[in-house]
Image (cartoon, grey):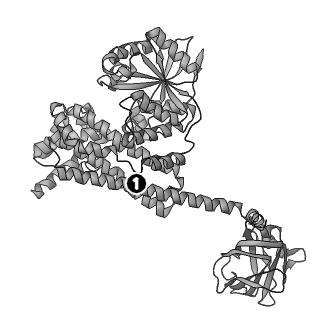
């Protein structure tokens, strides 16, 4: 597990209002099956934005697209390339 | 004694995320009186959220306006204490009125997820057992972890509580309602039948929706225009969860409601799923409409958390997009409804057609005999069957290429269509023929002429020509031999219209 992955997992675990089982989700796990709903997803997106200094574009504010930590990891990495 | 109102569980219904936890039980109560009422109510509520006229914040009046369309009303019973509550529950159930009791989530001890929520929830009550002092409620959040994976809706499972527990819930909730929700303080609601419904079908519901709302502006536009004000208001809400509650309401009002509306459109037009062209157009638009709203609300939620205001040109652009999508929605629905009625008229007309050949006297130039007792007679071409060539078809002899089959319709008939079922075997399909009409068997008029036919079924529109005799005149019976093979000859027309027009 590299630093970025650790950071993403830590932010998820600290997410207020998230169900406790959410912190057990693996990188490829579908977060929806760990209790993440669309509202919590938006909150998580904004927390990640602040931490990684990115802005998630409207079409990616969609839990169907960024449904796992791995998907988030790939999205954040792609924003590095854009910068 | 157990008194129970039997109602469906609505496992094929909707979820709280599509509507809300008060109006879904209300829909269930309406559904007790007639199964489809659940769906009608949720649709009408969804429409009210998007285009409805404000009932000046009057909760009871706005629900009554929906229920009245279903021939129902929201009955309000004044309740002052626990004894009065239990009496009112029994009285309403005895009168065939399912009870809707509003309670605070955090007073509903039976689900752990309710304990931290400060909001109102409707408890649907449909049974009581006076001997055992029990009340049965219908709770659509029970076993949600399981039902979400296997059911479309959140079914109203039964939960049996003692009268004391129900009274305790009501006492606690009611005390807080005095300050914050006066509309339900000291009140118990129930859904009663008061007359005949205005709505009789999904189709009527959708037609009324189009007519009533086609020129109205959606409340979503107002929400977009107010967005910056709301961001400022939410500055005070530092708790992301409190902001989430606001957007949960917005998502239900504009995104969840759209899912319900499109579901009802499909119920009104059930042929859509199997119609290639319209099905694709409808499905594509539905996905675009719903996705637009999903992304819009997600962006608003994120922008609120980001404390980011929308520039005026972006607000204007969004309001234009919402209006355009709504214009497209009403335009598409009008086209679909027009198509539906056109098809239904055509279907009804086809149903009324009659096959004159079924009663005709039939003759032919020749009939093929397998043996003296087995003859492929001319009459077999009008017997209404075409499965068995020996029993159900006319076969001519094989001596020459020209053959004819003649139908005497017994009197002059206005003919709309002639259908010929040829041999299903390749190489034996009737190749060249003329379809002719006459009123004296001397002078023949051509109805259709066919060359090099390759179809096993040929349909000839006759456009109302009027004949007593119909002749199929075959000049090239088959690719492989000289034998004509006709499995069925149908002559269709409208007897009632013909008679009426002749009068």
Relative image position of residue A66 (x, y in whole percent): 25, 48
Q: Residue at x 54, y 47 (%)?
A: B204
Judging from the image, mark 1 belongs to the subunit labelled B
The residue pinned by badge 1 equals B329
Q: Quadrant of the N terminus of chain B?
A: top right
Q: Position of residue B358 (x, y in %)?
A: 80, 67
Whether residue B50 sits left or right of residue B317 in the image: it is: right
**The image quarter in which residue B35 lies:** top right
- The vertical placement of B331 against A34, above or below, is below
Q: Is residue B132 visible?
A: yes
Q: Is B221 on the left-hand or right-hand side of B98?
A: left
Residue at x 40% of width, y 54% of height: B329
- Label 1: element kind: helix
**On the image, which quarter does residue B228 sit in?**
top left
**Residue B201 screen position, x and y as percent:** 56, 45
Residue extending farthest to the front is B503
* Residue B292 versus residue B396 in the image, above or below: above
Work out which residue is located at the far right of the displayed protein and give it: B372
Closest to the observer: B163 or B319? B319
């Amino acid at each position: 597990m590299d630093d970025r992955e650790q950071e993403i997992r830590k932010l998820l675990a600290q997410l207020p209002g998230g169900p406790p089982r959410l912190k057990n989700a693996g990188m490829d796990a579908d977060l929806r099956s760990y209790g993440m709903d669309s509202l919590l997803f938006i909150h998580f997106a904004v927390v990640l934005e602040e931490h990684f200094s990115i802005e998630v574009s409207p079409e990616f504010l969609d839990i169907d697209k960024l449904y796992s930590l791995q998907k988030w990891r790939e999205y954040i990495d792609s924003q590095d390339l854009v910068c | 004694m157990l008194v129970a109102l039997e109602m469906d569980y609505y496992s094929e219904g909707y979820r709280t995320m599509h509507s809300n936890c008060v109006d879904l039980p209300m829909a269930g109560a309406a559904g007790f009186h007639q199964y489809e009422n659940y769906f009608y109510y949720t649709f009408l509520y969804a429409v009210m959220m998007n285009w409805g006229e404000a009932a000046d914040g009057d909760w009871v009046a706005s629900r009554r306006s929906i229920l009245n369309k279903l021939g129902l009303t929201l009955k309000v019973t004044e309740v002052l204490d626990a004894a009065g509550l239990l009496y009112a529950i029994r009285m309403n159930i005895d009168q065939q009125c399912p009870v809707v009791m509003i309670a605070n989530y955090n007073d509903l001890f039976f689900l752990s997820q309710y304990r931290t929520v400060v909001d109102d929830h409707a408890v649907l009550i449909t049974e009581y057992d006076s001997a055992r002092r029990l009340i049965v409620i219908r709770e659509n959040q029970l076993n949600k972890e399981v039902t979400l994976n296997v059911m479309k809706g959140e079914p109203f499972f039964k939960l049996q509580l003692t009268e004391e527990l129900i009274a305790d819930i009501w006492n606690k909730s009611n005390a807080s309602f005095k300050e914050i929700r006066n509309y339900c303080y000291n009140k118990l609601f129930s859904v009663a039948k008061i007359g005949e419904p205005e709505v009789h079908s999904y189709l009527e519901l959708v037609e009324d929706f189009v007519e009533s709302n086609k020129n109205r502006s959606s409340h979503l536009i107002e929400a977009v225009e107010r967005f910056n004000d709301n961001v400022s208001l939410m500055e005070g809400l530092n708790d992301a969860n409190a902001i989430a509650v606001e957007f949960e309401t917005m998502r239900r009002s504009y995104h969840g409601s759209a899912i319900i509306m499109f579901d009802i459109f499909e119920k009104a037009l059930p042929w859509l799923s199997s119609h290639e062209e319209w099905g694709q157009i409808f499905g594509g638009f539905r996905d675009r409409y719903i996705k637009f709203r999903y992304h819009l609300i997600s962006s608003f939620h994120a922008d609120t958390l980001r404390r980011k205001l929308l520039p005026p040109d972006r607000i204007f652009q969004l309001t234009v997009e919402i209006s355009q999508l709504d214009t497209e929605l009403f335009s598409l629905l009008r086209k679909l409804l027009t198509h539906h009625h056109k098809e239904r008229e055509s279907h009804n007309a086809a149903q009324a057609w009659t096959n004159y050949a079924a009663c005709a006297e039939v003759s032919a130039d020749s009939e093929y005999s397998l043996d003296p007792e087995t003859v492929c007679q001319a009459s077999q071409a009008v017997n209404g069957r075409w499965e068995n060539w020996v029993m159900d078809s006319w076969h001519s002899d094989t001596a020459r290429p020209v053959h004819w089959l003649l139908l005497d319709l017994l009197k002059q008939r206005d003919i709309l269509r002639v259908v010929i079922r040829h041999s299903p075997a390749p190489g034996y399909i009737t190749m060249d023929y003329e379809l002719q009409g006459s009123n004296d068997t001397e002078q023949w008029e051509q109805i259709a002429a066919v060359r090099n036919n390759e179809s096993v079924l040929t349909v000839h529109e006759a456009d109302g020509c009027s004949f007593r005799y119909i002749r199929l005149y075959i000049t090239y019976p088959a690719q492989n031999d000289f034998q004509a093979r006709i499995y069925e000859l149908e002559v269709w027309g409208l007897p009632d219209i013909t008679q009426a027009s002749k009068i």
